[in-house]
């Protein structure tokens, strides 16, 4: 569902609660593995691990981290009232961990030959946040 669908009566945008502790720890340079261990529900921590693993060529590891962040984010989205569709705006910084996890999952899926999953992730990202697609270079 796109923003225009929302404006035409679709579901409202979902905004996750702030995860300041995780964001601040990562910004301070704390090892992302330690951050994820201390904040296992944080999609941002898992997305950071997924991105680092992918950059280092550890694609399967990236896939696993991204899948964890994706599912932790889905749990948070549901608790925030999300019903399985509708905008999850990139503009709301706390949403970025989940959006990054979704992107990382699709990227890694494509690399390991899971083309159907990669396509689903790309479409889900486009449906959730067109700006995330642009910001993450996922177009």
Image (cartoon, rainbow, N blue to C red):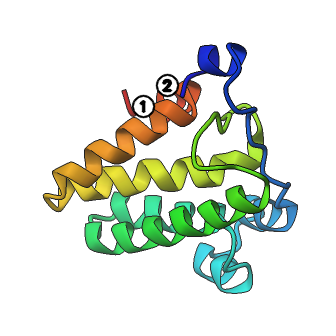
Q: Residue at x 66, y 39 (%)?
A: 88
In the orientation shown, which residue stands out farthest toward the left?
113
- Tell me if label 1 and label 2 are in contact, CB under 8 Å: yes
Q: Residue at x 60, y 19 (%)?
A: 5
Q: Is residue 73 above or below residue 90?
A: below
The residue beneath circle 2 is 134
**Relative to residue 38, is residue 110 drawn left or right?**
left
Mark carried by residue 127? none
**How far from the left and from the top, in percent, is residue 69?**
55, 66
In the orientation shown, which residue stands out farthest toward the front?
9
- At mark 1, the secondary structure is loop
Pointer 1: residues within 10 angstroms few (<14), some, or many (20+)?
Answer: few
Q: Is residue 110 above or below residue 127?
A: below
Front residue (pair 56, 8): 8
Mark carried by residue 137? 1
Front residue (pair 125, 24): 125
**How far from the left and from the top, in percent, is residue 59?**
27, 66
Front residue (pair 122, 139): 122
**How far from the left and from the top, in percent, is residue 51?**
45, 58
- At mark 2, the secondary structure is helix
Quadrant position of the N terminus in the picture = top right
Q: Residue at x 73, y 31 (%)?
A: 91
Quadrant position of the C terminus in the picture = top left
Front residue (pair 53, 119): 119
Q: Is residue 135 above or below residue 68?
A: above
Q: Quadrant of residue 109?
A: bottom left
**How far from the left and from the top, in percent, is residue 50?**
45, 64
């Amino acid at each position: 569902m796109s923003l225009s669908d929302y404006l035409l009566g679709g579901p409202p945008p979902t905004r996750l609660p702030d995860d300041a502790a995780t964001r601040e720890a990562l910004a301070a340079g704390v090892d992302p593995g330690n951050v994820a261990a201390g904040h296992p529900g944080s999609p941002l921590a898992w997305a950071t691990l997924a991105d680092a693993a992918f950059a280092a060529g550890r694609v399967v590891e990236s896939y696993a981290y991204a899948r964890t962040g994706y599912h932790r984010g889905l749990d948070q989205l549901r608790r925030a009232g999300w019903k399985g569709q509708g905008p999850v705006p990139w503009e709301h910084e706390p949403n970025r961990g989940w959006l990054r996890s979704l992107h990382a999952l699709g990227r890694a899926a494509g690399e390991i030959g899971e083309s159907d999953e990669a396509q689903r992730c790309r479409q889900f990202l486009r449906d959730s946040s067109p700006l995330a697609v642009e910001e993450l270079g996922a177009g």
